[in-house]
Amino acid sequence: MLIALAAIRLQDLFAVVMLFGVYSFMTATLFMDLDAVDVAFTEAAVGAGVTTVLMLSSLRLTSRWEQRPKHSPLVPLIVVGITGAALIYGTLDAPLLGDPNAPVHQHVAPRYIEQGPIEVGMPNMVTAVLASYRGYDTFGETVVIFTAGLAVLLLLGIQESPETKPGRTAIGDHQLVLRVVVKVLIPLILLYALYVQFHGDYGAGGGFQAGVIFATGFVLYDLVFGEGDARMVVPPRWLHRLAALGVLIYGGVGVISLLAGKAFLDYSVLAHDPVHGQHLGVLLVELGVGITVFAVILAIFYALSGRRRVS
């Protein structure tokens, strides 16, 4: 597939990226049909939404012809090959997909389903598992997102140039209808993101989806009204601080648990009633996830949109 992509022209890659977005949307529809609402939510927000915009922003910086590499690709190819072989070898002991006798279906899943409503008290089982039972894993994923954002900023940086001043030409400069429609949509998008953030324990959603949707609102504002206007609303210098703040909020909840003599990320110590403590803990850690995801996605978009193609 990569060889086929390399053989087509740059302008055709834009159509391929759009097809990827359509594919993600169809996948989200399939997950909805399978009653995996949270997964469908994430696929629609990330796959069909933000990922498509970021890929188009990356293609905008790509020149027509590939430059000759300065180093031999042999060593990276060997490293990737060895890593891929190790990953494939690691899956040989895994149970077959859909095997009803797999350990997860015999021990873990029944435990969550039977005890989750009593111990966590949340109607949304997905949020209960991710934020409470698998709080360690979700904290690690949040740190990974934060690290990825730092890596992008170190490699690309966010350009602070006169070209980003307010009034720079944008998509909506000569599209009055587009600007009016977007002005109506953006408040609704941000309000919906807040709903997803603080209602994820009762319905589909959570911090990750809310952060992506919130960032999407500002990306849309940037595309229609220009980079300078968007950066006046959310300055780039805020983003790395917000990303770190989200991780600190998540980790801080675990530190409070340790200081109270409980295990790390044991939310039962946050309130007089263990179930209420679970609700408060999940709310706080999901808030940390949402802040970090929002800051990292917007930082990556700023880093890509602020650069100019090098001929």
Image (cartoon, rainbow, N blue to C red):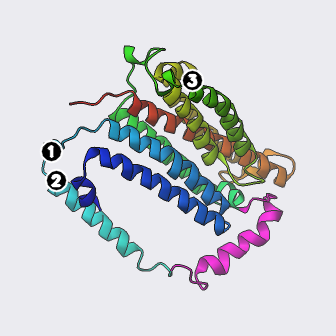
User: Main SS of the magenta segment?
Assistant: helix
- Figure quadrant of the C terminus: top left
How far across and how far down the image is residue 72, in percent?
Answer: 12, 51
- Name the kind of residue labelled 2 in the image: Pro
* Secondary structure found at label 1: loop
- Figure quadrant of the N terminus: bottom left
* Secondary structure found at label 3: helix
Q: Earlier in the sequence, mark 3 or mark 1?
A: 1
Comparing 265 with 300, the one in front is 300
Bin the neighbour count of mark 2 within 10 Å (Cα to Cα): few under 14, some 14-19, many 20 and up. few
Do tag 2 and tag 3 residues touch (Cβ < 8 Å)? no
Q: Earlier in the sequence, mark 2 or mark 3?
A: 2
Query: How much space separates mark 2 and mark 3, taking CA atoms?
Result: 49 Å
How far across and how far down the image is residue 225, in percent?
Answer: 52, 23
Residue for badge 1: 69
Residue for badge 2: 73
Do tag 1 and tag 2 residues touch (Cβ < 8 Å)? yes
How far across and how far down the image is residue 3, in percent?
Answer: 23, 60
Comparing 147 with 267, the one in front is 147
Comparing 275 with 242, the one in front is 242
Do tag 3 and tag 1 residues touch (Cβ < 8 Å)? no
Determine which of the numbered discs, if any, sits on residue 176 in the image. Answer: 3
How far across and how far down the image is residue 102, in percent?
Answer: 58, 82
Comparing 139 with 290, the one in front is 290
State yes or no: residue 116 in magenta.
yes
Q: Which residues are magenta?
A: 97-125
Is residue 138 visible in the rendered image? The answer is yes
Determine which of the numbered discs, if any, sits on residue 269 in the image. Answer: none
* Secondary structure found at label 2: loop
Query: How much space separates mark 1 and mark 2, taking CA atoms?
Result: 8 Å
- Name the kind of residue labelled 1 in the image: Pro
